[in-house]
């Protein structure tokens, strides 16, 4: 017979699991203008300076860090490929 290691934990009402904690619910639809606004708000000159320092062409770059892009992806939703591809059509 297997020994139990303490009482079984029952989640509290309204508690979130580790996989959903800290996530933002996806918006139904995000147009190109909204996506570009989100990118502009996450602009960091330090990110642009780092691109130049490492020799990455930055003439069309906005200067958004990877963590900033991931935060935007959580808002937009990761299953909408058209919304993710739309900013690429702007030349940025």
Image (cartoon, rainbow, N blue to C red):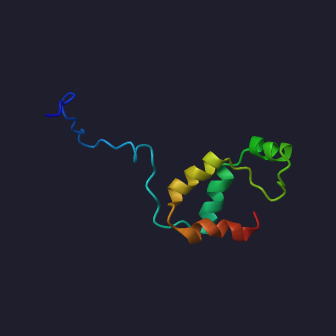
Quadrant hosting residue 16: top left
18 or 62, nearer to the observer: 18
Is residue 33 depicted above or below 65 in this figure? below
Q: Position of residue 31 (x, y in %)?
A: 58, 68
Count of numbered tags: 0
At 17% from the left and 34% from the top, the residue drawn is: 2
Dividing the image into 4 quarters, which one contains the N terminus?
Answer: top left
At 79% from the left and 47% from the top, the residue drawn is: 48
Q: Residue furthest top?
A: 6
Quadrant hosting residue 4: top left
Q: Is residue 67 left or right of residue 91?
A: left
Q: Position of residue 77 (x, y in %)?
A: 50, 60
Q: Is residue 83 left or right of residue 17?
A: right
8 or 14, nearer to the observer: 8
Is residue 40 depicted above or below 49 in this figure? below
Is residue 90 depicted above or below 65 in this figure? below
At 51% from the left and 56% from the top, the residue drawn is: 75
At 40% from the left and 43% from the top, the residue drawn is: 21
35 or 78, nearer to the observer: 78
Q: Is residue 19 left or right of residue 49?
A: left
Dividing the image into 4 quarters, which one contains the C terminus?
Answer: bottom right
Q: Position of residue 9 (x, y in %)?
A: 22, 35
Q: Is residue 50 left or right of residue 72?
A: right
Q: Position of residue 15 (x, y in %)?
A: 30, 41
Q: Residue furthest front?
A: 1
């Amino acid at each position: 017979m297997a020994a139990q290691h303490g009482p079984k934990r029952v989640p509290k009402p309204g508690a979130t699991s580790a996989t959903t904690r800290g996530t933002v619910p996806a918006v139904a639809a995000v147009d190109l203008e909204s996506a570009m606004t989100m990118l502009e708000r996450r602009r960091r000159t330090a990110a642009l300076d780092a691109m130049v320092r490492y020799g990455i062409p930055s003439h069309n770059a906005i200067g958004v860090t990877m963590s900033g892009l991931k935060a935007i992806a959580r808002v937009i939703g990761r299953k909408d490929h058209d919304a993710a591809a739309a900013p690429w059509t702007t030349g940025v």
